[in-house]
Image: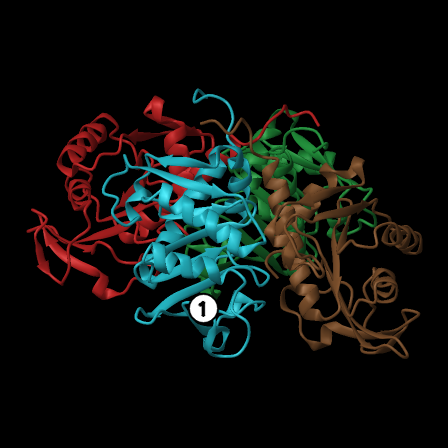
Chain colours: A green, B brown, C red, D cyan
Amino acid sequence: MRGWALGTSGNFSAVVSREPLVLTITATGLDKGSLSPEHFLRIDASGRVVEGLGRPSAETALHLLLANVRRAGAVLHTHSVWSTIVSEFYANAHGFWIEGYEMLKGLEGVKSHIHREWLPIIENDQDMARLAGVVESELVRCPNAHGFLLRGHGLYTWGESPEQAKRHLEILEFLLEVVGRTRTLSGSTGR
Amino acid sequence: MRGWALGTSGNFSAVVSREPLVLTITATGLDKGSLSPEHFLRIDASGRVVEGLGRPSAETALHLLLANVRRAGAVLHTHSVWSTIVSEFYANAHGFWIEGYEMLKGLEGVKSHIHREWLPIIENDQDMARLAGVVESELVRCPNAHGFLLRGHGLYTWGESPEQAKRHLEILEFLLEVVGRTRTLSGSTGR
Amino acid sequence: MRGWALGTSGNFSAVVSREPLVLTITATGLDKGSLSPEHFLRIDASGRVVEGLGRPSAETALHLLLANVRRAGAVLHTHSVWSTIVSEFYANAHGFWIEGYEMLKGLEGVKSHIHREWLPIIENDQDMARLAGVVESELVRCPNAHGFLLRGHGLYTWGESPEQAKRHLEILEFLLEVVGRTRTLSGSTGR
Amino acid sequence: MRGWALGTSGNFSAVVSREPLVLTITATGLDKGSLSPEHFLRIDASGRVVEGLGRPSAETALHLLLANVRRAGAVLHTHSVWSTIVSEFYANAHGFWIEGYEMLKGLEGVKSHIHREWLPIIENDQDMARLAGVVESELVRCPNAHGFLLRGHGLYTWGESPEQAKRHLEILEFLLEVVGRTRTLSGSTGR
């Protein structure tokens, strides 16, 4: 997927049913370069595997959280070079504004390039329960965010459907590359 | 198309007939990663759909304008990382000169690398009628331009035929990347 | 292989048997863009060809060393743009620390992004016996390293299996690109 | 070819016979993204078409020159982003040294990374006869060069065979990218 999920990194999920909540989610430790059905497990609202072999992604708690708190129908988590770099660069500010770009209109509910999108950066943590708590607080504080970065780690985004989640992923990765590369320019606009 | 039209962005059109004017143009909101015939609609000179299902691209007015004012047989509009970055970097100057590059000879009518090409940057606007008016004035002011940038948005280019439009697109995107990356170099030529 | 082994550069090996030690290794001077079985030779612990036609890679001594000293089941050596650039940039420090990145967890034995990975940089040398001696000392000094750079030359990494070696390669190349591109950013985090 | 010959740019030739000299060379104005036999013409030592339809590349004189003066069996000319950028950056110095890179060993006759390769930069010129004269002088002044840059235009390289020319192209484009990107790094090696 465009170099955004190398070396077993990244994970994906989709809601299969709401009542009761069942998610299909990528199993941990697999090469995501060539995903096929056996890479996916079904889990319930508590994260227990109800179908398929293997362990679910270590980050299952975040997928369940987004399915619940954001009513996401699909969640995508990728590790790209630019999301990693930008998440470190703006770490002290705990996020950054993206504004003025036409591409923002690809995010659900955004009608104009004049939109200001805050992309929160959350400190990475190997304690998933604790991290899920921090993420939940951040989602409450930023009800309009379409994604967030885990510092030094990668991007989470989501959508009502897998198609919308994929669109959000492409938009945000594009904008992260634009934001990052803009910091590599120097000099004034005079030539 | 080389990462220049991610996430439903970008749109393409071609003149089907001149009298009366009929354009084939991409429908809005579709993933341009895999274009097939059903992605295209036919519209008349007023932008009304005369064949096909769906809504035409929101930027139809600009395509019609180029078909009329520039006598374009095909129009291509893409959102690349470098066109976005460069359009912001030179926004205050309302454009920039590209000169000295052999690749310029790929633009229709250009015979030498000594050519100076002005690439106008136009402020982005969600009001399409107003934007079309501004673009029209700019096209009149710059009769030799082979394309223009919408700020924070992307590139428009065109040609007599789809092949010429594609060539102009490849040339201009190449030059935008060269211009942008040149701004990332530092230091003198001494080593 | 993702542009990491252009122009006959790069070489790969895997342990076929331990007692006696037999390695399969790429022959020298071949285009690695399209590897097939006839590109590989079998060599013994002294580097002598025991099966196949052609000369083994000039860097055979380093592959044997890693099979012995690190008990590697597979060794990968690539020449990427970013490994080359970074190996020159940090040459005077004889290496650099990589820390804080989630992607580090893809390296065998690493459990947290808080891990600090030292990537040694070793001066390049055309005298393979002498270079192997220097590399061996460095491997002893850095028992936890998952790879090393030869200055101006490229990356060596390895694993118990070809799959693990491939994972280490993808992780380290990703991190080299992150480290290198981070040096291209300028300014503070304020916007 | 890896984005090095977009928009009808770039041209390629190979010697078919020496006595009399016959070259097969790409016709002008074609999209090099999908080369097939009908893209090639045969020309004699004076540049006259002896087989095939269409006009030979405008830069035929340089191909003939290299076939004669360097005894090249194949010549490749590409327009890459990095060759264009670097050719402008070092234009005032009329070239630059590339040294210390293992990848240099891919150039014919180079045995060690300690090799210093001078890559001449020649001012671009639409007058092909005059340009050929300047290139010939430069080739005499730099008998060991494996290629040269035309300023703002692109790279010429060659080899005894098409395979060797392709290897030289990949090596030189790799090194041009390394040299260019190295200029984008800032700061000291301390972290």
Q: Residue at x 85, y 60 (%)?
A: B62
Q: Is residue C190 visible?
A: yes
Q: Chain of mark 1?
A: D
Q: Quadrant of residue D54?
A: bottom right
Q: Whole-percent x and y of residue A162?
A: 64, 59
Q: Please give left or right for residue A170 compared with residue C130 in the image.
A: right
Q: Please give left or right for residue C149 compared with residue C185 in the image.
A: left
Q: Residues within 10 Å of mark 1 (few under 14, many from 20)?
A: many
Q: Is residue C34 above or below residue D53?
A: above
Q: Residue at x 87, y 52 (%)?
A: B135
Q: Secondary structure at mark 1?
A: strand
Front position in the image: D71 or C11? D71
Q: Whole-percent x and y of residue A55?
A: 43, 52
Q: Is residue A53 visible?
A: no
Q: Whole-percent x and y of residue D186?
A: 52, 26
Q: Residue at x 59, y 58 (%)?
A: B2
Q: Whole-percent x and y of residue C140?
A: 20, 28
Front position in the image: D86 or C23? D86
Front position in the image: B75 or A179? B75
The residue under label 1 is D25
Three-letter amino acid code at the position of disc 1: Ile
Q: Please give left or right for residue A3 compared with residue B155 in the image.
A: left
Q: How many marks?
A: 1
